[in-house]
Amino acid sequence: MTDTWIFPDWPSPSRVHAAVTTRHGPGISAAPFERFNLGLRSGDMADAVAANRSALQQVLALPAPPRWLRQVHGTSVAELGPLPSPDEPQADAAVSHIPGTVLSILTADCLPVLFCTDDGSQIGAAHAGWRGLAAGVLEATLTQLHSPPERLLAWLGPCIGAASYEVGEEVRAAFVAHAAAAEGCFMPTRPGHWSCDLTGLARRRLAAAGVTRIHGGGFDTFSDARFYSYRRDGARSGRFASLIWLADS
């Protein structure tokens, strides 16, 4: 881990590569996005975002341009290959079995989750804000990986921490209605409000689906200035990327 990049610490196969950007990368975005904003829909100059994305590919020596998604806090999963497309699929998760395909998730407080099989034959990536997480985006991603859950590894990337994430009753109710045990991820703060452990909720959902090898966590994008944070910075917050790809076998 550095101030510029985070490389997941998980026992993935050698052909599986992953990285997470921070706002301190080799970008050119000006304030308030300075400087490595990778999100096109955050109000930044399109030319600056394009330059940042090009620098990302070069500095990390990615095998192909990242496959970006039009994320809508839903549960759709795109199956992707390495060839770039002028249109970004509307989806909140992606899977691939094709070497050279770089899957990418953009976040600024929501939870990015990376997946791989233990033989390195498949990868996945999901965008899990509270709405998508409650609706089942992680379970939908697991289904599209077409592998038994005991063969999967998951890594939970940087998201807003429980101490910084106060939510209302509608959020708590959405999770508790699915599983009463989710109550353990909410602590009361004031009447009608709770702190929400997004990472803890993801761990519960993955474990319930049979995934036992779950790594990562321990971040707080709100309090850690390396990361963009929508809740801290408002609507003109930038976005950082969580990336995963397969090298040739």
Image (cartoon, grey):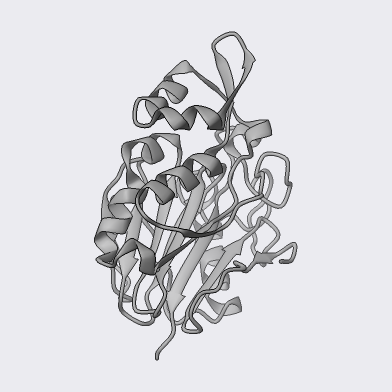
> Which residue is outermost to the bottom?
249
Q: Quadrant of the N terminus?
A: bottom right
Going 51% across and 84% down the picture, which residue do you hit?
14
Asked whether residue 89 is in view, the answer is no
Q: How many marks?
A: 0
Say which quarter of the image contains residue 74.
Answer: top left
Image quadrant in which the C terminus is located: bottom left
Question: Residue 108 or 167: which is nearer the viewer?
Answer: 167
Task: Report x, y in % for residue 141.
Answer: 32, 55
User: Which of 206 and 17 lies nearest the eye of the viewer?
Assistant: 206
Residue 235: image quadrant is top right
Give the percent coordinates (x, y) of residue 15: 46, 84
Q: Would residue 87 be found to the left or right of residue 63 on screen? A: left
Left or right relative to 197: residue 130: left
Residue 162 sits above or below residue 241 on the image: above
Residue 68 lies, in percent from the top left, at: 39, 60
Residue drawn at x 63%, y 58% as measured from the top left: 36
* 210 or 54, nearer to the observer: 210
Specify whether 133 is left or right of 58: left
Say above or below: 123 vs 177: below
- Name the residue located 55 percent from the left edge and 50 percent from the top edge: 239
Residue 19 sits in which quadrant? bottom right
Specify whether residue 136 is in view.
yes
Q: Residue furthest top?
A: 191
Residue 35 location in percent, x, y? 67, 56
